[in-house]
Amino acid sequence: MNRHEQQVSEPAGRKARVKAALALTTVVLLIVGLYFGQPEDFVLWIKALHVVAVISWMAGLLYLPRLFIYHTDAELGTVQSQTFKVMEQRLLKVIMNPAMVITWLLGLYLAWDIYGFRGGWLHTKIALVVMMTVVHLVFSRAVRDFATDIIPAGQGICIPPPHIAQQFNGIACQRRPTDQTDQRNKPDQ
């Protein structure tokens, strides 16, 4: 497989960025068009887009820990390791981040305009979304750490922490043996 056929190549990355920008622009234009057009079923459209954004965000939150587990099994510097880095970064930047922002914006719009921030269920729901956002930020840090290949010696590469991986993906976090972990911090010999 030559460099242009791989998903880690520059042309493939450029193509993915263009597709992502086009999809995000389409969603934003749809939301803006709905807002200014104000059809009779406007609230139903906003609720539907909110649900799609939440599902997209949750799918990313559930899939990213699985990528972390696979990434820990890949040897450093291999094509497989580089592919996991690209997959993690694209999942985070192209799907999860926009879905989180759209979820928050549409959710706050619905909470304010439709429900007036009233109801215990709404406050509970917002608290849960805040917790999901914290998990999202932890996963974002993990993606950044995996991209650098530098993990503190003796700590393994169990990112996210085991309890988060188990709760959100039903999997146990795997650690590399200490001797492999220590090599991540050593310069090439």
Image (cartoon, rainbow, N blue to C red):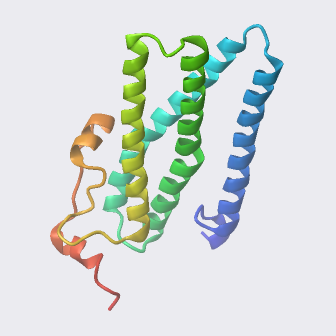
Q: Is residue 139 above or below residue 43?
A: below
Is 40 above or below relative to 4? above
Q: Quadrant of residue 41?
A: top right
Image height of 158 relative to 136, above or below: below
Q: Which of the two residues, 89 or 77, is positioned nearer the viewer here?
A: 89
Q: Residue furthest bottom?
A: 189
Instruction: Please state the horizontal and vertical placement of residue 98, each as a whole percent of the image.
Output: 59, 41
Q: Position of residue 119 (x, y in %)?
A: 42, 10
Nearer to us in this view, 126 or 98: 126
The answer to which image quadrant residue 11 occupies is: bottom right
**Residue 75: image x %, image y %?**
35, 69
Above or below residue 187? Residue 151 is: above
On-image quarter of the C terminus? bottom left
Q: How many marks?
A: 0
Residue extending farthest to the right is: 37
Q: Is residue 40 left or right of residue 58?
A: right
Q: Quadrant of the N terminus?
A: bottom right
91 to the left or right of 76: right
Using residue 164 as the reference point, say whether residue 124 is left or right of it.
right
Task: Name the residue located 66 percent from the left edge and 12 percent from the top edge.
Answer: 44
- Residue that appears at 37% across and 20% down: 124
**How far across and down, in percent of the image, does residue 73 sit?**
31, 60
The residue closer to the viewer here, 178 or 127, is 127
Q: Nearer the viewer, residue 5 or 68?
A: 68
Residue at (36%, 46%) from the top-left corner?
65
| Identity of the residue drawn at 70% across and 61% down | 14
